[in-house]
Image (tube, helix red, strand yellow):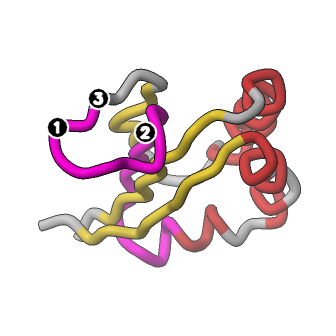
Amino acid sequence: MTTYLVVNCTIKDMDLLNEYQAGAGPTLAGHPVTPVVVNNNAEALEGVPAGERVVILGFPDREALLAWYHSDAYQAVIGKRHAATEGFALIVDGF
């Protein structure tokens, strides 16, 4: 079952977020991931989102997502995302 990482956040420091993206991209190599959405201009239809940035990455299953997320390579750069944004990340199982 496909599992998605869903991030919704407000960008506090675009330069630092750019550094994070440059470092995070290569950590995906060798992992079975499909980028679904990477957008800085989301518009709320209902409710109050954490911010305008939405990222959705699809993985074949939860184990694959967590293998990438907990990898040493990704953990080395995730602090930049935390410092550059304010929001949340979810793991969501698809159909």
Task: Name the amino acid, label 1.
Answer: Leu
Q: Residue 13: x percent and y percent?
A: 77, 30
- Amino acid at dot 3: Glu
Is the C-beta separation of discs 1 and 3 under 8 Å? Answer: yes
CA distance separating discs 1 and 3 = 6 Å
Q: Nearer the viewer, residue 22 or 68?
A: 22
Instruction: Give 60 or 19, whichever is nearer the viewer.
Output: 19
Q: Is residue 65 left or right of residue 4?
A: right
- Residue at 76 percent across and 40 percent down: it is 84
Residue 17 percent across, percent down from the top left: 74, 32
Determine whether the residue tagged by mark 3 lies in a helix, strand or loop.
Answer: loop
Q: Residue furthest right?
A: 76
Rendered position, 69 above or below 34 = below
Q: Which residue is mark 3?
A: 43
Label 2, secondary structure: give it.
Answer: strand
Q: Which residue is mark 2?
A: 54
Q: Given this view, does label 2 or label 3 mark the residue nearer the observer?
A: 3
Q: Quadrant of residue 42?
A: top left
Image quarter for residue 61?
Answer: bottom left
Q: Which residue is mark 1?
A: 45
Residue count near mark 1 (Cα–Cα under 10 Å), binned few <14, some 14–19, many ≥20: few
Q: CA distance from mark 2 to mark 3?
A: 10 Å
**Which residue sits at x=56%, y=73%?**
66
Q: Residues within 10 Å of mark 2 (few under 14, many from 20)?
A: many
Numbered range of the magenta stretch:
44-65
Q: Please say whether residue 31 is one of the residues in the magenta stretch.
A: no
Q: Position of residue 18 (x, y in %)?
A: 75, 25
**Label 3 Cα neighbours within 10 Å, binned few <14 / some 14-19 / many ≥20:** few
Amino acid carrying label 2: it is Val
Nearer to us of marks 2 and 1 is: 1
Looking at the rendered structure, the number of numbered marks drawn on it comes to 3
